[in-house]
Amino acid sequence: MRVIFSFIFLTMIITLGICAFVAYRSKKSIGKPVTLLEASLIPPIVGNLMIIASTQKQVAVLGCYLYFLGMNLIMYALLRYTFEYCMMKWVSPILKYIIHFLLIIDSIQILLNPIFGHAFKNEMIYIDSEPIYRLVPYAGQTFHRIVDYSIFLDILIIFIFKIKQTSKVYVKRYMVILMSMIATGAVLTIIIFSRIPVDVSMLGFGIVGYLVFYFSLFYRPAGLLDSMLASIAYDIPDALFFFDLFGKCIWANGSGKKMTGVHNNEYELCGKKIYEMFGTIDIEKREWSEKKVIGSGNAARYYSLDTYVLDDEKGKKTGTYLNIHDNTDDQQSFKNELYKATHDLLTGIYNKEYLYEMIKKTLIKNPDERFCIVFVDVKNFKIVNDIFGTDFGDHALRCIADWIKSDVSSKCVYGRLAGDTFGMCIPIEEFDEERLEMELSDFIVVSGSMEHHVLIHLGVYEVIDINTDVTLMFDRAHLALSSIKDEYNKHIVRYDDNMRAKVIWDQKISAQLHEAIIEGQLQPYLQPIADNSGKVVGCEALVRWIHPEYGFLPPGNFIPVFEKNGMIVEIDRFMWKSACEILSKWKSEGIDMFVSVNISPKDFYFMDVTAEIKNLVKRFGVSPSKLRIEITETVMMDDAEKRLSILKEFRDDGFIVEMDDFGSGFSSLNMLKDMPVDVLKIDMNFLGKTTDDKRSQTILRNILKLTNDLEIASLTEGIETEEHYKILVEMGCKLFQGYFFAKPMPVEEFEDYCNIRQVK
């Protein structure tokens, strides 16, 4: 028996050493705790080998010390391994330190046994006529057993807790180790109390070591991967169906059962339901895909069907699985995003970009049909928002959109361009101008107790070339609207060649302005201004263009163009400079007359008007009182308070400020009380077409009286006859301007006219 157990223990020591080495080389996180545990099992086995193999008492006693200290090392290593293997954490760091402290104290008291003899001693007995030194335990040995058994019991409890907590597929990896430890502990207990001299429990510790080594580093639970894959497949949102080699459905996941309405494991019924729902499904091809739609409208469901053939390890077909993905949410989301990208969210009709795209497609699709582009403009829409509020304004836009899309064919395309403008592309035969005029003449928007007549204008461009850019088509339709402006009795206007010619003309002369100024094509013309005695006391500087190709250009052919595009600023700057040059020349010649220059409303947007004019006056050494500043009432329409301060600044610096075209507008009389002006230019329209218009004469007489009372000089323009002149003199007018005296003329002619030209 001694030889047999010696051989067994020696074999265990060698194999445990190999296990420790392999675990040490492992890259798994559990490798280090396993290494320590495998190595800790060797000392107590070596100790037991010394006890049973030696007949010398000293060797047997040394084996006991190695055995007891090795058991403490086992408890420490087993505890560390347990926490790592079971993936547990210490409840409290204090508890951890207490256990470690007990193991250290126990090891110390065992080592002190040779001095105090309190732990154990060895007594000799005979087995098979051979002496063996059996252990005789004392108090110290009892303490040692209490410490180790307590830790061992805690380790068993941790394993039991982990088994209850974990999934069934993992129970085996914990249960085997737990049962082997319980068995080993039970055997050890029996040996202790029966005082059997050979500790066969070491065999159990060896087995525990081998199990730990295998289950920690190499074991993979049988069926774990299959179970996990089945669980994953069962819970995924796509419907999965597996068919055998004969086309019979043998398994379906949860989504598949739900789709087919099968709640038990009648998988064959699932297959039949799938065929009923989707019709033909090809499970013979290696890969097959198809899109299916079930239902229609908002209730439609969209599916993607894909089949794949499954092969075994030899490449032979074992079956097919079908994957059905519900794309309905994706399709709905795509439709929503597409709608937002192509439609105006307020009105529900196309937005500008998509409208242009659809018009282009419509024209290409119907090359033999005639279409017209309609630019829909809501006039003065800002007033609607200001008076009724934005909610009413939004409602009005929706009503207009509803009107646009009503009673049109599928060939008509419409959308919202921006703000209060809309666009249409409509077959010419559907464009009923008479009906539209009637509808637009009484277009009323009603919301609750509020209602408002909305003025809508339509600019119409007939498509001649479908290859023309859609943007250009709408530009031409929009251009047509400029001919009706704010008219209330006409709502529809068509684009014609005259409008196109005007656009070309505007572009041409705008491009030539800079060169015209440099080359002297632009010239100041002077129109005399006389006093009530008929003497010329000054003039108004008016720009004229002597064009090298077109000759003398009437101001009406280019001034409105430059007023619109802002280039009037360059003309005004040129005229101010020219006026200062004339005044500077007259000053040197001793001529005492003023020159009146115009200021456009656009000038205030593009430059500092006061600084510009002051610099010119200073540069040419001209008296500010000789350069009169002439404005119209439209200058005051925007930012009136700031403009008033600018006029006051002119007057404070010695300039004479004139207000032009008084009476031609609507707000002049109301603004007169606040405007810092020195001269009021009165429009001759007050006299009407005949001089015996008593009503007009009464109004004009009172205006002249009003200017005298306000100490404002009066200047009547448009005097064409001597009769006009005499009537106005009688009424008390101070200054006069018109064709009765002279038309605007070049500077030299003006000087000759006034007989002021120097003879050299």
Image: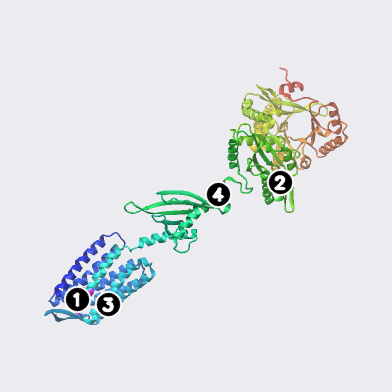
Q: Position of residue 510 (x, y in %)?
A: 63, 29
Q: Give the alpha-carbon distance from disc 4 to disc 3, as whole Å.
A: 72 Å
**Residue identified by numbered label 2:** 383
The reply to whether discs 4 and 1 touch (Cβ–Cβ < 8 Å) is: no
- Please tell me whether residue 485 is drawn above or below residue 225 in the rendered image: above
Residue furthest to the top:
760
The residue singled out by tag 1 in the image is 64
Location of mark 3 (residue) = 186
Q: Quadrant of residue 488?
A: top right
Residue 264 numbered mark, or none = none
Quadrant where the C terminus sits is top right
Residue 307 sits above or below residue 60 on the image:
above
State the residue at coordinates (45%, 49%): 289
Please identify, in this view, whether the residue under mark 2 or under mark 4 is nearer the observer.
4
SS class, disc 1:
helix
**How much space separates mark 1 and mark 3, taking CA atoms?**
20 Å
Q: Amino acid at mark 3?
A: Ala
* Mark nearer the viewer, 3 or 2: 3
Q: Position of residue 162 (x, y in %)?
A: 36, 70
